[in-house]
Image (cartoon, grey):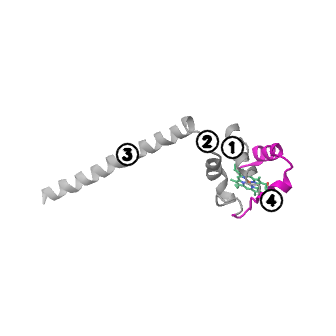
Amino acid sequence: MKKHVVFIFLILLIGLISACSNDESANTIAGNDKSSRAITENDVFQKSCITCHSSGDINGGEIKLDSVKIHDDFKDKSSLYNFVSNNMPKSAPGSLSKEEYQAVVNYLWGQKK
Ligand code: HEC
């Protein structure tokens, strides 16, 4: 009976230890992400825009980011950049870095068909 209790205790302990170390490695990866990994265009869209503009396909989603509409609404890339960097993400305008805005604008503008 006593052995049984010790065994359960050990299992719980191992679970606790691995939960903690998982947390740590997740933090480290997130930290590295910001500082050393190159930002790709699609990354920014997936991370900061997809919640409202739905799928990676800019034609999908609730508020459609339609490549044709974008090119109708913005006459060139710099006006798109100005709009996006001043107004998006709608929930936190201006919250991305210059590089991130540039990347996501390149991504959207590049969707022109
Ligand atoms: C919290 C929701 C939300 C997020 C996140 C968000 N948007 Fe928007 N976006 C909107 C809404 C709502 C509109 C409609 C115009 C308005 O209300 O300003 C819009 C409009 C746009 C438009 C104009 C489309 C057109 O053709 O007129 C662009 C471009 C755009 N968003 C790009 C982005 C980009 C790029 C990101 C990520 C950096 C992003 N949005 C993140 C809600 C959001």
CA separation in Å, label 4 and label 2? 25 Å
* Dot 3 or dot 4, earlier in sequence: 3
Looking at the picture, which amino acid does disc 1 mark?
Ala
Disc 1 target residue: 103
- Mark 1 or mark 3: which is in front? 1
Mark 1 and mark 2 residues within 8 Å of each other at the beta carbon: yes
Residue shown at 84%/46% (left/top)?
76
Q: State the image coordinates of residue 2 (x, y, percent, origin top left).
A: 13, 56
Q: Residues within 10 Å of mark 3 (few under 14, many from 20)?
A: few
Secondary structure under the numbered disc 1 in the rendered image: helix
* Dot 2 or dot 3, earlier in sequence: 3
* Residue 12 appears in the picture as rendered: yes
Secondary structure under the numbered disc 3 in the rendered image: helix
Residue at far top of view: 35
Looking at the picture, which amino acid does disc 4 mark?
Val
Q: Residue 14 in magenta? A: no
Disc 4 target residue: 68
Q: Which residues are magenta?
A: 60-89
Q: Classify residue 51 as left or right of residue 74.
A: left
